[in-house]
Image (spheres, grey):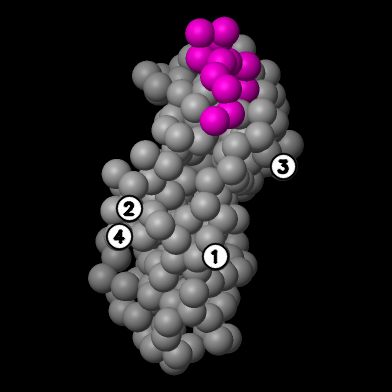
Amino acid sequence: MATRTDAEIKRDVEAELRWNPSIDATDIAVAVKNGVVTLTGFTKSFSEKWDAERAVKHVSGVAGVANDIEVRLPSIDERPDPEIARDAVTALKHRLPMSAEHIQVTVKKGWVSLEGAVEWQYQKESAEAAVRYVRGVKGVSNLVQVKPRAAASEIKQKIDEAFRRSAEVDANRVMVEAKGSEVILKGTVRSWAERQEAERVAWAAPGVTRVDNRITISL
């Protein structure tokens, strides 16, 4: 497959943003250089900013995303920090009833910070997902740590097995190295989406605290 030009990527990114029903792309500007997409402008919620970034990563040819979108809440959605914190805690307890007590929430000028420790990466991701849609949130810093719970050899084995089961990742083109609780991914894949899926699979292994994704994209 021929390498896509920046102009082609820009066209498809703009089309993807317009097509997505959860995004109002009216005030979002797109720039592309060497396959790296920069988003500027503003959205009316943090979740919309996040949805825009996620949508862009699925466009063919995208090598990276710089999300510089500003969140400008409508006046009706502006809320005091204590109210946001209260609803964020409630959302965490609903989403993670068994581990929410290990996560601390602080809010400053609408920006939510999550701290604490959990046993699985999916719990860390679920915590962020839970507070992302709380009304009044302007941004989220996910500082929750994942505790290591498995030997490096076991981590590597489980990730290799997961790659072999995956229909979206070519296991023959991705190499896994585990150093303690940290994982290094190497090799080449066909798209940004496949690269992201390989990283997601690696993070899903029990005990993983860091993933160094060195996979390159070869179209």
Tell me if mark 3 has few (under 14), some (14-19) or many (20+) residues whose alpha carbon lies within 10 angstroms of its own: few
Magenta residues? 71-82
Q: Earlier in the sequence, mark 1 or mark 4?
A: 4
**The disc labelled 4 sits on which kind of residue?**
Met
> For mark 3, what is the residue?
34
> For mark 4, what is the residue?
98
- CA gap, disc 2 and disc 4: 6 Å
**The disc labelled 2 sits on which kind of residue?**
Leu
Q: Earlier in the sequence, mark 1 or mark 2?
A: 2
Give the percent coordinates (x, y) of residue 216. 59, 62
- CA gap, disc 1 and disc 4: 16 Å
- CA gap, disc 1 and disc 2: 15 Å
- Magenta span contains residue 80: yes
> For mark 2, what is the residue?
96
Q: Earlier in the sequence, mark 3 or mark 2?
A: 3
Give the percent coordinates (x, y) of residue 202. 44, 69
Q: SS for tag 3? A: loop
